[in-house]
Image: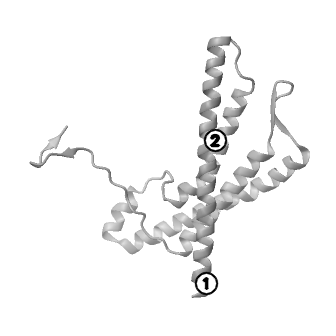
């Protein structure tokens, strides 16, 4: 009982961090849209592009992916092919559930390895203050990117591990109607 409540509490904390990181990722997307639009306007009207737009886009893509990764794992929206598992679930649900646990365990291991490799990189970049970009034009430090990669991977690892421990079976599939039906039962196209 105590172990279950501890796992539930850890799961709530991990989910809260994943949601917060996703919000930061979404805000990064919005900031990127503003920067790209400002760059296009500055190029078109004033023939003067914003400095560092290229570098900002490169770094933002990495930030967005790793800020939103844990929440994507949390809501079972990580891109993967579940067709075989969905077919198997109808005939052999226990086997399908065990295969999902194995896939989640392997995924946790890979995410843990990424975090394990990236954390020393973060510490190195923090200490050396290495930067990305063109000196005198636009530079940005590397350490925030390395920290986001390490943190996002570690959080995704934790969420995958919690899915294995709690034996979360089959995610709920979202079905969207392709066509509206009329009152007589026919399709309204």
Please give the name of the residue rendered at 55% of the width and 71% of the height, measured from the top-left corner: 164
In the rendered image, which residue does mark 1 sit on?
3
Query: In terms of depth relative to the viewer, which is nearer, 144 or 119?
Result: 144
Is residue 63 visible in the rendered image? The answer is yes
Q: Position of residue 9 (x, y in %)?
A: 61, 75
Above or below, comparing residue 29 to residue 11 in the picture: above
Q: Position of residue 57 (x, y in %)?
A: 66, 33
Q: Quadrant of residue 33?
A: top right
Q: Position of residue 95 (x, y in %)?
A: 41, 72
Query: In terms of depth relative to the viewer, which is nearer, 98 or 123?
Result: 123
Give the residue at the far left of this rendering: 184
> Left or right of 87: which side holds 28?
right
Which mark is drawn over residue 28? 2
Query: In terms of depth relative to the viewer, which is nearer, 125 or 31?
Result: 31
Mark 2 / mark 1, whichever is N-terminal = 1
Q: Position of residue 135 (x, y in %)?
A: 86, 27
> Left or right of 43: which side holds 97?
left
Q: Quadrant of residue 137?
A: top right
> Left or right of 145: which side holds 178?
left
Which element carries disc 2, helix, strand or loop? helix
Classed neighbour count for the residue bearing mark 2: other residues with Cα under 10 Å, few (<14), some (14–19), many (≥20) = some
Looking at the rendered image, the disc whose residue lies closer to the viewer, 2 or 1, is: 2
Is residue 133 visible in the rendered image? The answer is no
Report the number of numbered marks.
2
Above or below, comparing residue 98 to residue 22 in the picture: below
Above or below, comparing residue 11 to residue 176 in the picture: below
Query: In terms of depth relative to the viewer, which is nearer, 112 or 140?
Result: 140
Which element carries disc 1, helix, strand or loop? helix
Quadrant assignment for the C terminus = top left
User: Are discs 2 and 1 less than 8 Å apart at CB?
Assistant: no
Check the image and tell me how it is coloured.
one colour
């Amino acid at each position: 009982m105590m172990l279950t409540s501890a796992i539930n509490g850890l799961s709530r904390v991990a989910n809260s961090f994943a949601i917060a990181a996703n919000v930061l990722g979404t805000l990064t997307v919005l900031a990127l849209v503003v920067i790209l639009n400002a760059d296009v306007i500055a190029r078109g009207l004033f023939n003067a592009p914003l400095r560092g737009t290229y570098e900002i886009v490169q770094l933002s893509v990495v930030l967005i992916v790793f800020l939103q990764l844990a929440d994507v794992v949390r809501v079972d929206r990580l891109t993967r092919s579940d067709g075989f598992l969905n077919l198997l679930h109808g005939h052999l649900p226990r086997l399908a559930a065990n295969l999902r646990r194995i896939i989640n365990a392997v995924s946790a291991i890979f995410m843990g390895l990424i975090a394990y490799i990236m954390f020393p990189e973060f510490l190195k970049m923090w200490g050396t203050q290495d930067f990305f970009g063109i000196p005198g034009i636009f530079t940005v430090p590397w350490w925030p990117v390395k920290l986001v990669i390490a943190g996002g991977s570690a959080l995704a690892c934790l969420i995958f591990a919690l899915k294995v421990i709690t034996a979360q079976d089959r995610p709920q599939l979202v079905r969207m109607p392709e066509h509206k039906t009329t009152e007589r039962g026919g399709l309204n196209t």
